[in-house]
Structure formats: structure tokens, C-alpha cells
Image (cartoon, grey):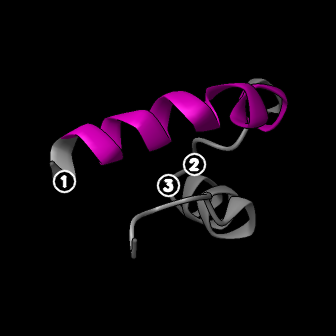
Amino acid sequence: MGGVYALDFAAVLMLADAMGALNTLLVELLPEIEPIILRAYAKASE
């Protein structure tokens, strides 16, 4: 309980834009890589 369960896509995309890294590949792949990122956070919190 209390763990990460989703990414804030708007925040991720705004951060990428601010870093000059926003591109269509990120936009298209973000939903696909979200579960991988969430699993990594879950492992790190154990």
C-alpha cells in the first residue's frame, strides 16, 4: 500500500519538453514502458 501505481504522463512529457527530449517516440512508447518503470520502483521499494 502507498506505492507507485501509475505515472503522471503529463508531468513526464512536460519534463521531457523542458529537457529538450520530447519527441514522438517518447510519446508513443510511454504507455508501453510504464509497467516496466513501475516494476522497477516496486523492486526498489522492497
* Chain part drawn in magenta: 26-43
For label 1, the residue is 45
Q: Amino acid at mark 2?
A: Gly
Which picture quadrant has residue 39? top left
For label 2, the residue is 20
Q: Amino acid at mark 3?
A: Met
Q: How far separated are the C-alphas under marks 2 and 3?
A: 4 Å
Left or right position of 30 against 12: right
Q: Nearer the viewer, residue 38 or 31?
A: 38
Which residue reaches farthest front?
1
Q: Earlier in the sequence, mark 1 or mark 2?
A: 2
Instruction: Describe the element under mark 3 as helix, strand or loop.
Output: loop
User: What residue sits 72% from the left and 59% below the top?
Assistant: 9
Task: Name the mark on residue 19.
Answer: 3
Q: Main secondary structure of the magenta part?
A: helix
Percent of width and height locating residue 16: 58, 52
Marks 1,2: beta carbons within 8 A: no
Instruction: Describe the element under mark 2 as helix, strand or loop.
Output: loop
Marks 2,3: beta carbons within 8 A: yes
